[in-house]
Image (cartoon, rainbow, N blue to C red):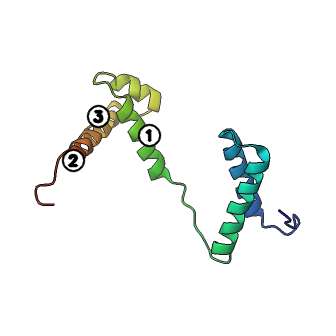
Amino acid sequence: MSENKNRYPEILKDLKESVVKSLIAQGVELSVANQSAHVAAESIRKDWGGILVYICKGSGYDLSLRDEKIWSEFTGHNHQELCKKYDITIQRVYKIIAVKRQQDLMDRQNDLFG
């Protein structure tokens, strides 16, 4: 991992730090985490270097994960508890449950014409 630390792009340094932290949190040994983070940063540098890349915040993804958690925690009578836990309105909980219930039904039904 012989990088010139003075010339290495700041965004790739930040990426490496983030990957190292994530890997260590998953129980990966520090030296392995550092090597893996370097490989990831170098791959991105080589594949995307010179390209203007926009990285969205992923709000829709976060909401999707939240909705999945709500659906998995839903017991049929804990709407109020879910409102408080996820800081959303009761109407939003009902809507999330209705959408997830419909998706679950569609996932379990066979397509007549497919």
Give the labeled residue for mark 1: 66
Question: How far is mark 3 from mark 1, CA to CA?
Answer: 14 Å
Task: Report the front residue among 60 and 65.
Answer: 65
**Residue shown at 34% from the left, 37% from the top:** 92
Dot 2, crowdedness within 10 Å: few (<14), some or many (≥20)?
Answer: few
Q: Which residue is mark 3?
A: 94
Which quadrant of the figure contains the N terminus? bottom right
Of marks 3 and 1, which one's residue comes earlier in the chain? 1
Q: In the displayed structure, would residue 39 be above or below residue 66?
A: below
Tell me which residue sits at (48%, 46%) in the image: 62
Horizontally, residue 1 falls left or right of residue 51, namely: right
Q: Amino acid at mark 3?
A: Tyr
In the depicted view, which residue is nearer to us: 112 or 15? Answer: 112
Answer with mark 1 or mark 2, whichever residue precedes in sequence.
1
Front one among 33 and 50: 33
Provide the residue designation for mark 2.
106
